[in-house]
Image (cartoon, rainbow, N blue to C red):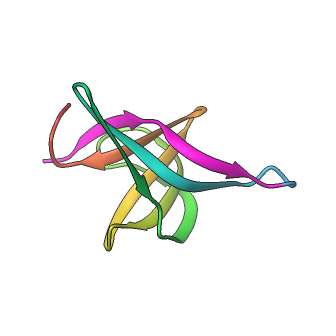
């Protein structure tokens, strides 16, 4: 089962207004870790399996393919565990 988790993202806004995620911030209780987005593989409009839609960024993070969504001015990721 997948869950929707809103997360902080460090992103570059290009001169034409395009967004490129550079890293994600994963927060668990009082622990905070920053993970670099190694590569953006694909960018397109899409719906999430966990609800919601927006711009989908398929990214490589720590050697794994992850789906990162930009929806209404905030970011979320599909994850295996709830908060």
Residue 16 in the image: state x and y as whole percent: 86, 55
Q: Residue at x 87, y 54 (%)?
A: 15
- Compared to 1, does 40 lie above or below? below
- Compared to 36, does 47 lie above or below? above
User: Which residue is situated farthest in the right direction here?
Assistant: 15
Main secondary structure type of the part rendered in magenta: strand
Q: Residue at x 62, y 48 (%)?
A: 11
- Picture quadrant of residue 66: bottom left
- Residue 27 colored in magenta in the image: no
Q: Residue at x 22, y 25 (%)?
A: 29
- Residue 9 colored in magenta in the image: yes
- Picture quadrant of residue 36: bottom left
Q: Is residue 5 left or right of residue 7?
A: left
Q: How many marks?
A: 0
Q: Residue at x 25, y 25 (%)?
A: 30
- Compared to 72, does 54 lie above or below? below
Q: Is residue 14 left or right of residue 27?
A: right
Q: Is residue 9 left or right of residue 27?
A: right
Question: Which of the pair 77/28 is nearer the observer?
Answer: 28
Residue 41 in the image: state x and y as whole percent: 51, 74
State the extent of the magenta-drawn residues as a range.
1-14
Question: Which of the pair 17/71 is nearer the observer?
Answer: 17
Residue 82 in the image: state x and y as whole percent: 17, 35
Locate the C terminus by quadrant.
Answer: top left
Residue 73 in the image: state x and y as whole percent: 60, 32
- Picture quadrant of residue 63: bottom left
């Amino acid at each position: 089962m997948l869950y929707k988790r809103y997360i902080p993202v460090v992103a570059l806004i290009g001169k034409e207004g395009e967004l490129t995620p550079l890293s994600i911030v994963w927060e668990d209780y009082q622990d905070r870790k920053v993970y670099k987005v190694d590569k953006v593989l694909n960018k397109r409009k899409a719906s999430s399996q966990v609800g919601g839609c927006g711009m989908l960024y398929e990214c490589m993070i720590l050697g794994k393919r992850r789906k990162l969504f930009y929806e209404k001015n905030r970011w979320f990721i599909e994850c295996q565990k709830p908060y």
